[in-house]
Amino acid sequence: MADIAKIKQRITKLRELLNYHNYRYYVLDSPEISDAEYDELMRELKQLEEAHPELITLDSPTQRVGAAPVEAFGVVEHPQPLLSLANAFSDEELDAWYRRASNLLGSRKTDFVCELKIDGLAVALAYVNGLLEVGATRGDGLRGENITQNLRTIKSIPLSVPKEAPPRFEVRGEVYLPKAGFKKLNEERAKDGLPLFANPRNAAAGSVRQLDPRITAQRPLDIFVYGLGWAEGKAIPDTHWEIMQYLKSLGFKVNPIIALCHTMDEVKDYYAKWVENQDALPYDADGVVVKINPIPFQVELGYVGREPRWAIAYKFPAVQGTTRLLEIGINVGRTGSLNPYALLEPVQVGGVTIKHAALHNEEDIHRKDIRIGDWVVIQRAGEVIPEIVEPIVSRRSGKEKVFHMPKTCPVCGAEVIKPEGEAMHRCTNAGCPAQALERIKHFVSRGAMDIEGVGEKMSQALFNAKLVEDVGDIYSLKEKREQLLNMEKLADKSVANILNSIEKSKNRPLPRVIFALGIPNIGEETAGLLAEHYTSLDDLSGATQEKLQEIPSIGPKIADSIVAFFRQQQNKKIIEKLRKAGVRLEAKKVEAKKLPLAGVEFVITGRLDAFPRQEAEARVKALGGKAGSDVTRKTNYLVVGEDPGSKLDRAQALGTKTLNEAEFLELLKKSEGKLK
Ligand code: JCF
């Protein structure tokens, strides 16, 4: 056996390597090694730590996966309060802010730092002797919640800092969810009948304030650091600009879109540029923060109440419009929830035609006092579904109607109930055709069984033709070839393709199968958790409420939902159909790093003939590969379709290998062959 000193040495080395590569990947966005190599280092470290748990340290990269859940967050007192910012909504208000500041500064000239105001959640990170000790929310500015365990899961937050850092200091930043991550999260939640997050800010806050850090760990949260709270035991630079460079040198992620401006005209140019380009950012920004650069000036200027005189948020104009609410429509979801939505007189808001807006539930409609026929103010923000801000009460004619949820299901006519403590109304008929159809759409969808060629329209057609009445019927379609050919006059080849992708879906991993069943309240995250504890569907279907609740983060509501689902006769029949058809209902043990394309990164540019880009990317990922959006040094292949963009120039500049569509397809086929 190797002696303990050697093991310690190796563990230290592995941690250094992993921390370094983590920094290259998550902070600099410029990795030096492949994912497979990274995984291999991590695996070795995990093994050593498992064998020697006494050697685990808090800053070990293995400790980012999410600790055990807590009952409630502790309270953290902020040694220096976390401030908010005063807002300016026009050049005049910005000028007024500057005038007040320069009055106090007299004849001394100042410069400014401009940065984007990220729409996220402010946090304070305290480091003691090189280690992240406490991470907290802003709370009321004086006292926040201790969310250290959750913040540790965010890979761009350093768990330790170099020796040169002050012995004690606090960094402040904004934790946020990129637009793409937000969209994906909400799509998943919509499929599961879970309430949607209204915007990325709420989604980030909800993710960070999870009592179970393992849920936080699954959300693609990121951070931009925007300042130093306090520091002890070391001299720090005396301008905000230099402090930001200093924080960057300590390994913190500073938004590269930060500018040192010498005049107010430069500040206004910066603002104008980002008002114009905000949609192109991969995250939501709601304005520009302007700060007086020299720290001595900041100290002199001080505060008014909770707001500093030395900084201001110059907000981007909200994209609002007014229109009429023509009607309130209702969709019946997969779990029977009645989801109201607004039908609007079409209106242009910020260059986009808006016809629909989200209405969450009856209570929400009444709380805002929205009536059918009202003139309403609507607001659009980035990727988010437009929202009704408020009715314009002064424009009412008296003919507007108060909305009430129907007493019966608009699709099947069954009784509608509103369960105690829930916001949503529900159709009580488990056999409601709307629910049945939604369940089929969910089952075939991308995050679930991912049956290529069977999308929403095809699901609807199969359902209307009574060829598929529940998800179990999908796998007997091959016995109904004739009817398929008749239906919608499908070509021989399309039928063959559909049947082929149905066959392929039989081999999906267990978490997807659990998710695809559409058990109320079970999203992708929970399905993943369940598959960690149960190795087959039979295993899961036999679990009791008590047993299920032993899994941290599974509460009585989810446990109930699972038990009730497997108890239903109809669902038992469906599962039997799946089993008979040969759908794999057990876990398979193929480690991700053994997949044929593990560690290989593709970027696709231009149009492909064979399938949409998303689908190509999904296939790459299913094979263990990565699909990137930008060509970087870590890109292995650029796939070049028709009308390629500037990515091709970049690939040529970097010497990245390129594949045409045919070469790409061949590589996919060969790799998929290796899976069998
Ligand atoms: O990005 C932000 N939301 C942000 C918030 C950026 C800043 O520079 C801030 C802030 C809140 C307070 N600065 C202060 C002083």
Image (cartoon, rainbow, N blue to C red):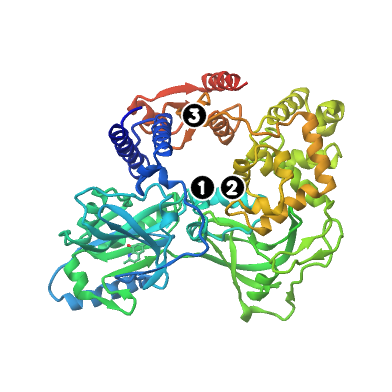
Quarter-of-image position of residue 40: top left
Q: CA distance from mark 1 to mark 3?
A: 19 Å
Q: Is residue 640 left or right of residue 234?
A: right
For badge 3, the amino acid type reads Lys
Q: Is residue 291 left or right of residue 47?
A: left
Q: Is residue 369 left or right of residue 332?
A: left
Q: Which of the image's four quarters has the C terminus?
A: top right
Label number found at residue 218: 1
- Name the foreground residue: 164 vs 283: 164
Q: Position of residue 398 (x, y in %)?
A: 72, 81
The disc, 1 or 3, on the residue closer to the chain's N-terminal end is: 1
Q: Position of residue 71 (x, y in %)?
A: 53, 63
- Residue at position x 37%, y 48% in the image: 156
The disc, 1 or 2, on the residue closer to the chain's N-terminal end is: 1
Report the residue marked by disc 2: 525
Report the residue marked by disc 3: 593
For badge 1, the amino acid type reads Gln
Quarter-of-image position of residue 295: bottom left
The reply to whether dot 1 and dot 2 touch (C-beta < 8 Å) is yes
Q: Position of residue 410 (x, y in %)?
A: 82, 60
Q: Tag 2: Cα neighbours inside 10 Å, few (<14), some, or many (≥20)?
A: some
- Residue at position x 30%, y 70% in the image: 79
The reply to whether dot 3 and dot 2 touch (C-beta < 8 Å) is no
Element class at badge 3: helix
For badge 2, the amino acid type reads Glu
Q: Is residue 240 visible?
A: yes
